[in-house]
Image (cartoon, rainbow, N blue to C red):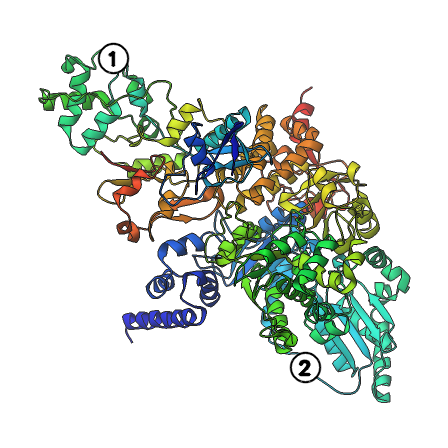
Amino acid sequence: MRIFINGKEIAPREGETVLDICRRSGNQVPSMCFVPRAEHKPSCMVCMVKDEDSGQMIPSCSTFPSDGMRIDTVSDEVISTRKLAVELLLSDHRADCEAPCTMVCPSGLDVGEILYRYDKGDLAAASDLIFYAFPDPKSACEGCKAPCEKVCRRGTVDAHVAIREIIKEVVEAASTATAELLPPTQRASNSAFNSRLGVFSPQEKIDLKRTVTTKSACLHCACLSRDDCRLREIATELKIKAPRFGVSSLQPFKAAKRLTGRLIFEPAKCIRCGLCVYNTEDGFTFKRRGFAMQVIIPEKSYSHVSDDIASLCPTGALSLEH
Amino acid sequence: MCENCKDRELREAILERTDAIIGRVGKSRDRIIPLLQALQDEFSYLPSEVLDRVYETTGIDRAQVISVATFYSQFRLAPYGKHVIKVCNGTACHVKGADNVYDAFRRELSMKGDTVTTADGRYSIENVGCLGCCALAPAVQIDQRIYGHVQPGRVREVLDEFEREETARKEKEREYVNRPPLGEIRLGMENCCQASGTAAIYSEVKRCCHDLDLDVVVKPVSCVGACNQVPMIDVAMRDGSIFRYPNVKVEDVQEILLNHFNTGSTFRRFRNRLFRSLDHLQNDKVWYSDVWKEPVERTRSINNFLTSQKRISTEGYGHMAPLDLDEYITCGGLEALGKVLSGMTPEAVTRQILDSGLRGRGGGGFPSGRKWAMVASEESPVKYVICNGDEGDPGAFMDRILLESYQMRVIEGMIIAAYAVGASHGIFYIRAEYPQAVIRTRKALQMYRDKGYLGKDISGSGFSFDIEVFEGAGAFVCGEETALVNSIEGKRGFPDLRPPYPSQEGLWGHPTLINNVETLSQVPYIIRNGANEYSSIGTETSKGTKVFALVGKVNHGGLIEVPMGTTLKQIIDDIGGGVEGGEALKAVQTGGPSGGCIPASLCDTPVDYEALKGMGAIMGSGGLVVLSECSCMVDVARYFTAFTSGESCGKCTFCRVGIRRMLDILDRICVGKGRAEDLANLAELAESISKSALCGLGKTAPNPVLSTLRFFKDEYLEHLDGMCRTGTCKDMVVYQICDECVGCTKCSKTCPAEAIEYTPYEKHVIDTSKCTKCGLCIDECSYDAIKKVPIRQTITSKQP
């Protein structure tokens, strides 16, 4: 059997899908709902290629070659179809990649991470980040107009997180840095795609006021998987800036749940690819259909899943706490 | 007994009932849909303790139940009221104002906010896809009873009627048998006929026959298709003459009977005559009844309706009883099956179908013979034949009528198909919204079995085949072959990527032939009369006849069967009697949510698969919704997009999110908040979805948008400009009373929102801040004094 990819003839090997052949022959095709050696069904439609004979776009991850097939992976039409698929997924993805406070800090302080560690009670780790960024932490935020507090999402709910005071508190409690200064986690470059959550509805504000009762009152906007998210990588690759269709979703909002020791499930970030559904036994499952379809897991089934499942998830919907 | 013991006893009783059902239906994972259906029948919803029992005692786990029970719209996880009101939101009902009917019921039953159940738990209300009574739109179903022509103003009346019937339901029909009958009274008893009150006519005929001592056979017959003229009765005399009475009222029945039949005894004859004359003296209403018009005048529109048609699938309409195998056989039924079993090879049968040019009637029009040949060529000890009766298109009810009235023919076609492809097992997949079709098909199958036409060694031919019925659970997408197969296997109705096609790997991985109800019903004709005769009907590429549901704004809607190649104009004018209310024809919507809108200017084109496709529509299953100048095309596009958005299975991104984004844009346009870039985005989404969605449903879902963008772009542009010329888009108009008002106060009395002050003999005024734009006042006004005025005009007119 012979098939043609972008005009180049290739002989498929036994059992290979069109995606396998494309990748083997050096044609980059992105994919999200497909992971090698895991049970999967085509759903994300990001791996689209064009069957030049029928004029149809086909998901390469699940299509097997047929003799004489002519596949196009690079034309504008193919790229814009993939781009549209990602834009659609992003329009249903109400979440922040980065915490807004971190994004605006003129000193490059990872504010979101500091607040995260602060709420975990790990003051030492929090202070490390501050000591690393400032030669003189004691006067770190003095004179700063605190854009972090201005963009704080909690501010639109009731009052912004008292970021400067918390930093002061951390610095005072630690007073010196621990022996080894950890280098800060690699910040995503400015060109990386950044998903934004948008505004809260009145009802969401009421709910958030009631449910988020951490010590700092921080909503922890930053995504746990921000550095390990295929959705973000592909959006960056396709040069998507802002989602064209706005962002609106029916997914439960800010409803992160701890399933096992370190496994956190955040449905708002789910793209409904079903990898976790197909690869657990009586664990994750689909609920409802159409745009309202969710992936859920009943509490009684938490014990049926393990931490490993997080590695299959292409987004931050399933992530491991570090 | 203490409270705890009572509770425990109650719980145990529930578990016992649950166990009994599980024992009856089965415990394996593939039995989940029938199991949940049986449990819901028993408990009216799916209580959590019952589901817990299912997890404990069967192979079905929690994940599967959640996944399946929340996918299909039939299943309820919370209790409902005692009676369920289903307001049809099919296309025909939608264009005739179903939204207002829904609101009217909620208002009448004082349902506030999001609640769907009355405070006393007596009624629950829901919108349903399509009840298949499109010729009687707007239609409403309460429990098993269907009501037609339910205008918002009739809501109280319908509820009262239902309550009355509920109390009087126990009355039994009295049986009587004696002398050879004088003749037959035939009347249709399909779902839609019943919606028009045929049941009342039926019992009145029975009652009169008994009271007047008339020996007349009262025979429910198959659908005539003239759904707009029901209740209709045919009086068939012993000499073979037939008298037809359309639009019969209960009070006409006795007159009709006495007009044709005389009673046995002289005394009764005298008594009847006397009482009748006295009756006439007392009330004069019988003198004005339609019944006394000349036969020609009485039935002209029906005759026009019926004569331009050609019957293959609906052969025997109006005289053949459904569910009567003997009569079916005397009318030429089973001749084809006999011919096949007594000497034709499977290859010869397939060849006949191939030569006939028969194409699938369910959607794309794939040549049926090629499909049969594909399944026949597969090497497999097990093969299946599935009859796809999951007709979910709003605005279409062909399959329902075929299964209710002509199921004998469909079954015959299916047995022939099984013989041709070498299948031993068949499944009827029928949607749950058609209970009558399910019951009748089951009965018909039993009749076939009893006579040895189904089961082991059919008619001594050595060929064995049996059929079971599988009830769908409410999901439009299950009309797609692979989704249908998944649904039978007890999974969510997710379609799979093809290839592999079901003809290679279908149900349980075996080669499976899936044909639509109507396709199979054409098969006996082809075998009986030969491929040549069949292929002489129709056009070059599309052979035979097509059954259409002619509905919407047409004078005589109903079920029709015409040769392929008939033009839409012929159908609307000759058969349908023109557009309702003398309005101008604007477009015809064909093929339901997967189809498109064909503008009036193209309605001269002969209808076949290719022609429709060329006009951006599809044949689909055959709904023809007539749209007049008063129909808003953007609203039609929005309606279908909302439908497919709600019915999307959710598997692939383009359908799940893409259609929703199209709907967002259309919603915005229809409330006058459209943006400049909306049309370009809408077009891009529509084109990409049609090229990239995973299954047929997704790929065809943008057709209503694409075709309206193509032919009615000016209406979109007007909407962007804040104007809906038909006044359909409520948010763009205000109601105003103009100078024609004589102050009759009717509108004020009828307004449910108290937005019109009571000012007798003066021009009334609508308080627009209170007005809900329900349209009741417009229906009520005899002077045509209430107008829908575009908001934009009211703003500009106020400026000097």
B462 w.r.t. A308: above or below: below
Is B489 left or right of B51, judged from the image as shown? right
According to the image, label 2 marks what residue? Answer: B174
Q: Position of residue A17 (x, y in %)?
A: 45, 39
Q: Position of residue B198 (x, y in %)?
A: 71, 66
The secondary structure type at the circle numbered 2 is: loop
The number of numbered discs placed on residues in the rendered structure image is 2
Q: Nearer the viewer, residue A113 or B738?
A: A113
Pointer 2 chain: B
Q: Nearer the viewer, residue B109 or A50?
A: A50
Q: What amino acid does circle 2 point to?
A: Arg
Residue B711 visible here? yes
Label annotation for residue A144: 1
Residue B247 visible here? no
Q: Nearer the viewer, residue A199 or B91?
A: B91
Q: Residues within 10 Å of mark 1 (few under 14, many from 20)?
A: few
